[in-house]
């Protein structure tokens, strides 16, 4: 099974924090309140942030093995 990681379109992110609140791994942070960043080392690709984002600007990307 391919591994997935969340990615944020930082140009469109408004730093609302919805994704950060639902991430079970604490992989998302909002540095300086500008946009959300995903820590790929902590992200497990569950997709909860994708579903929660009101702007639909988070996606799951397949990571090559």
Image: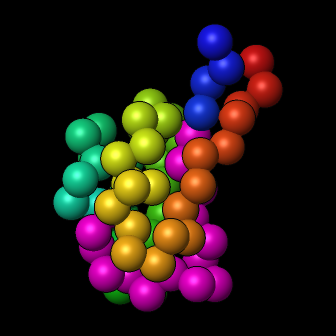
Is residue 47 found left or right of 64 in the rendered image?
Answer: left
Count of marks placed on residues: 0
Whether residue 10 can be seen here:
yes
| Residue pictured at 55% horizontal, 70% vertical | 57
Is residue 18 placed above or below 61 in the rendered structure? below
Magenta span covers which residues? 5-19
Q: Quadrant of the N terminus?
A: top right
Does residue 15 belong to the magenta stretch? yes
Does residue 48 belong to the magenta stretch? no
Residue 32, picture quadrant: bottom left
Residue 7 on image: x %, y %: 59, 56
Is residue 27 found left or right of 56 in the rendered image?
Answer: left
Is residue 11 placed above or below 42 in the rendered structure? below
| Residue pictured at 45% horizontal, 55% vertical | 50
Residue 30 or 46: which is nearer the viewer? 46
Is residue 56 placed above or below 15 in the rendered structure? above
Residue 12, picture quadrant: bottom right
Is residue 10 placed above or below 26 in the rendered structure? below
Q: Quadrant of the C terminus?
A: top right
Residue 33, picture quadrant: bottom left
Q: Residue furthest top?
A: 1
Residue 44 on image: x %, y %: 44, 31
Is residue 18 found left or right of 61 in the rendered image?
Answer: left
Residue 2 on image: x %, y %: 67, 20
Residue 24 on image: x %, y %: 24, 40
Magenta highlight: main SS? loop
């Amino acid at each position: 099974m391919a591994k997935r990681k969340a990615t944020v379109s930082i140009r469109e992110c408004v730093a609302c924090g919805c994704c950060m609140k639902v991430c079970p791994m604490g992989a998302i942070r909002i540095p300086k309140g500008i946009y959300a960043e995903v820590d790929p080392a902590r992200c497990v690709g569950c997709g909860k942030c994708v579903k929660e984002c009101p702007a639909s600007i988070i996606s799951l990307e397949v990571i090559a093995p």
